[in-house]
Image (cartoon, grey):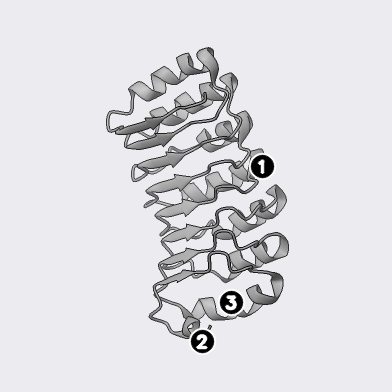
């Protein structure tokens, strides 16, 4: 763990490290010293609850570009608090929050984060319980940055009503090259609404809609 104190560390990977409260405390004390940190990976670390909230307060927002928090089962209330801490992170390029509970309320806070991210390229929100309401929260206000090229919304319970908002959302994200919508109960009516949004994606290279 001593390597964490060095300012030149650019990437840290704690996958499967079991980040309980006892371990997050020392980590938070070291992260501000990592002034060159660009990538932080914390997938499957069991970081949740108060630990997830504390992590957000200790991240170096002036330099962090890639943040992976997948498969931690963070609850919506805690995710909202964590996302609030991420609002100043204007340098984020990759944000992966898959397999956590964002929900509708968390989506509103996530939109605030994205509004400040002028460089975001990849947004992964697989199985985050966005639902129809979460989609409408993400499309609200200003469009997402033109830098966004990859969007993963798999398995989020997006139905026909949500597709109306999603179509509008896609019309604002014309530089998307990869879009994943698999395992959402979109149905025929939803697919019809999506058509207008998909037609605006002139840069689209890969579209996944299996089990829709």
Residue 10 in the image: above or below residue 103: below
What residue is disc 1 on?
Answer: 105
Is the residue under label 3 in contact with that under label 2 (CB below 8 Å)? no
What residue is disc 2 on?
Answer: 2
Asked if residue 176 shows in the view, the reply is no
Residue 77 in the image: above or below residue 171: below
Image quarter of residue 56: bottom right
Residue 171 in the image: above or below residue 44: above
- Mark 3, secondary structure of its residue: helix
Cα–Cα gap, marks 2 and 3: 10 Å
Closer to viewer: mark 1 or mark 3:
3
Tell me the crowding category of disc 3: few under 14, some 14 to 19, or many 20 or more residues within 10 angstroms, Cα based: some
**Which numbered disc, 2 or 1, marks the residue that appears first in the sequence?**
2
Closer to viewer: mark 2 or mark 1:
2
Residue 211 in the image, given as x and y percentages of width and height: 52, 25
- Mark 1, secondary structure of its residue: helix
Closer to viewer: mark 2 or mark 3:
2
What residue is disc 3 on?
Answer: 27
Residue at horizontal 58 percent and vertical 28 percent from the top: 158
Residue at horizontal 44 percent and vertical 84 percent from the top: 6
Is the residue under label 1 in contact with that under label 2 (CB below 8 Å)? no
Is the residue under label 3 in contact with that under label 1 (CB below 8 Å)? no
Cα–Cα gap, marks 1 and 3: 28 Å
Residue at horizontal 61 percent and vertical 30 percent from the top: 157
Farthest residue in the bottom direction?
A: 2
Tell me the crowding category of disc 1: few under 14, some 14 to 19, or many 20 or more residues within 10 angstroms, Cα based: some
Cα–Cα gap, marks 2 and 1: 38 Å
**Which numbered disc, 2 or 3, marks the residue that appears first in the sequence?**
2
Residue 105 in the image, given as x and y percentages of width and height: 66, 42
Asked if residue 197 shows in the view, the reply is yes
Residue 151 in the image, given as x and y percentages of width and height: 43, 40
Left or right for 115, reference 57: left
């Amino acid at each position: 763990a001593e390597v964490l104190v060095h300012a030149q560390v650019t990437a840290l990977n704690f996958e499967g490290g079991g980040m309980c409260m006892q371990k997050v405390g020392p980590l938070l004390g070291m992260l501000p010293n990592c002034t060159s940190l660009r990538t932080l990976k914390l997938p499957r670390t069991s970081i949740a609850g108060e630990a997830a909230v504390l992590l957000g307060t200790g991240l170096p927002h002036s330099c962090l570009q890639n943040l992976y928090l997948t498969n931690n089962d963070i609850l919506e209330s805690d995710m909202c608090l964590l996302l609030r801490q991420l609002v100043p992170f204007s340098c984020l390029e990759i944000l992966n929050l898959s397999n956590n509970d964002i929900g509708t309320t968390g989506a509103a806070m996530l939109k605030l984060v994205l509004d400040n991210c002028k460089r975001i390229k990849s947004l992964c929100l697989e199985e985050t319980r966005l639902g129809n309401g979460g989609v409408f929260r993400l499309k609200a206000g200003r469009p997402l940055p033109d830098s966004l090229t990859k969007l993963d919304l798999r398995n989020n319970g997006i139905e026909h009503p949500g597709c109306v908002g999603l179509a509008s959302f896609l019309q604002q994200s014309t530089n998307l090259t990869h879009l994943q919508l698999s395992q959402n109960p979109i149905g025929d009516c939803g697919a019809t609404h999506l058509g207008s949004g998909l037609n605006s994606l002139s840069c689209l290279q890969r579209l996944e809609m299996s089990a829709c």
